[in-house]
Image (tube, grey):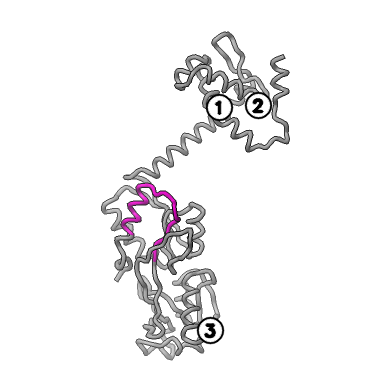
Amino acid sequence: MEHQQRSAGRLSPSSDTEDMTMSLAPRLAYFAGVARTEHVTRAAQELGVPQSTLSRAVARLEEDLGVDLFSRHGRTVSLTPAGRTFLTSVERALAEVRRAADEVRADADPATGKVAFGFLHTMGAETVPGLLQAFRLDHPRIRFSLVQNYGEAMLEKLRAGELDLCLTSPVPDAPDLVARRLDEQKLRLVVPADHRLATRRRVRLVEAAEETFVTLEPGYGLRRITDDLCQEAGFRPRIAFEGEEAETLRGLVAAGLGVALLPPPAFPRPGVVELTVTAPRAAREIGVAWLEGHPDTPPVAAFKKFLLSRRGNLLPT
């Protein structure tokens, strides 16, 4: 009769899997405790719950599954074949939960936790290594997960919870994000070494109106800034090549394939000349952004405070 009642209570194949998972999950630790001790009273003492609560949880688990997990012998119990099969998967699941809990606790540890930090490709050679070196003078054991990407992609990672902070340009203005301007970086017109403007030190951007440009792809912040500056100078740039990385664009310029508006390089590049742009004012703002309302772990809070303290002194001189 008991087996028939359990069979009648078995969830139908059409039952929602997620609802079943939510129903089963809280009872798994209780089941594993009883299976380990083979005694309901001892299991209740070890788990710190009333025996009646434990007995009801195990009985409800069996009812939801539609199978007997234990054979009962007075106050002692033993696993049925179905119970042994179920225990193997339950122990694996509980171990994974414990591993995940240990991992998130470790990531939030004030001394040894982790910061997921995103930044632009153009800041990877000097700026970010210098920042991390300075930060770790006072926080030597904090770990970093570093992501290099273009601005819009990093903002999407912020929104998805994959990043804690990011350095980006332009500084975003969105209701779901908090952004703070940290510094400004001048942009230069980069031309081939044998270019007609290569003997100059300064140039107005309109003087390059008839040139072919090499730029980053649409969606990159620097591409948007390039388009806006050219529009302000009174022309629309003729684009020959689009890339994903500033130093690749410098290589294209050196090969005589066009000119480009780029931030200063980490190291001088042979084959190109970098000209100061006098009009319009060619610069990009660098800022730090994070998700509005997202609670900071102690390591993230410490690194955010450090970045904000570098306002006006973020970039190498």
Give coordinates of residue 286: x percent, y percent. Answer: 39, 68
Residue 220 is left or right of residue 13, and the answer is: left
**Residue 218 occupies quadrant:** bottom right
Whether tag 1 and tag 2 are in contact, CB under 8 A, the answer is no
The label shown at residue 65 is 2
Residue holding disc 1: 27
Magenta part of the chain: 287-307
**Residue 82 occupies quadrant:** top right
Q: Nearer the viewer, residue 64 or 121?
A: 64
In the image, residue 69 above or below residue 254? above
Residue holding disc 3: 236
**Residue 63 occupies quadrant:** top right
Whether tag 3 and tag 2 are in contact, CB under 8 A, the answer is no
Name the quarter where the C terminus is drawn: bottom left
Give coordinates of residue 109: x percent, y percent. Answer: 35, 43
In the image, residue 119 above or below residue 32? below
In space, the residues marked 1 and 2 are separated at their CA atoms by 12 Å
Q: Is residue 189 magenta?
A: no
Name the quarter where the N terminus is drawn: top right
Q: Nearer the viewer, mark 1 or mark 3?
A: 1
Q: From this viewpoint, is residue 16 visible?
A: yes
